[in-house]
Amino acid sequence: MPVKILMVCLGNICRSPLAEGILASKLPEDQFLVDSAGTGSWHIGHSPDKRSIAVAEHHNLSIAHQKGRQFSTKDFDTFDYIYVMDASNYDTVIEMAKNDTQKNKVQMILNELFPGENVDVPDPYYGLANGFENVYQMLDEACEVIAKKVIEKHS
């Protein structure tokens, strides 16, 4: 059974689809399953933002097939690791957890680069196009660390 990793942001159209695509590209798909979700419900069934798709394609990743969905309490049972993009996402997901086992699955993604600092991945939705590239670079670095860690632990 594959190790399951979930990436969570607000709308599941900008940051978490990028994180899903980046991490999935770094892991053997027969051993790991990567998915993404949003804490909000606005974009259920929608494709990622065209700017996220474009920056992913610039880095030879395809995320256009992804469809937005909302995080649910069932995700605590399904996923082994849950990475959130910012403090607001963290608070929302933690509030939904029923116990410490579920809470312990949830981590701020940039804590992989800056342990304990709880640095947010900025939401590029209302910003300029270069904000998506900046987010891509942050997520790529964090996902590299995550990939090494989970491959070492689970392979």
Image (cartoon, rainbow, N blue to C red):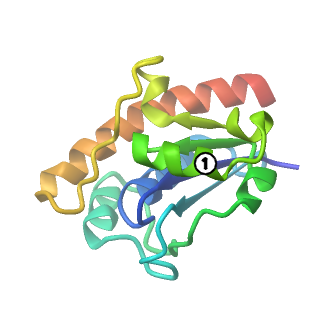
Residue nearest the viewer, comparing 97 with 6:
97
Taking the spot 56% from the left edge, 69% from the top edge, the residue there is 70
Task: Determine whether 13 is above or below 129 in the image.
Answer: below
Which residue is more in the foreground, 135 or 125? 125
In the rendered image, the quadrant that contains the C terminus is top right
Residue 74: image location, x then y, percent: 76, 61
Q: Closest to the observer: 126 or 48? A: 126
* Identity, as a three-letter code, of the amino acid under mark 1: Glu
Q: Position of residue 123 (x, y in %)?
A: 28, 52
Residue tagged by mark 1? Answer: 95
Q: Is residue 127 above or below residue 138?
A: below
Residue drawn at x 43%, y 77% is 43
Give the image location of residue 100, x and y in percent.
Answer: 76, 34
* Residue drawn at (23%, 42%) of the image: 134
Where is residue 122 shown, x and y percent of the image? 27, 45
Query: Where is residue 78, by image quadrant?
Result: bottom right
User: Which residue, as the protein is rendered here, is positioned at the far bottom?
Assistant: 45
Any part of residue 19 in sight: yes
> Which residue appears farthest toward the top when viewing the image?
115
**Residue 155 visible in this rendered orientation of the protein:** no
Circle 1 Cα neighbour tier, 10 Å, few/some/many (<14 / 14–19 / ≥20): few
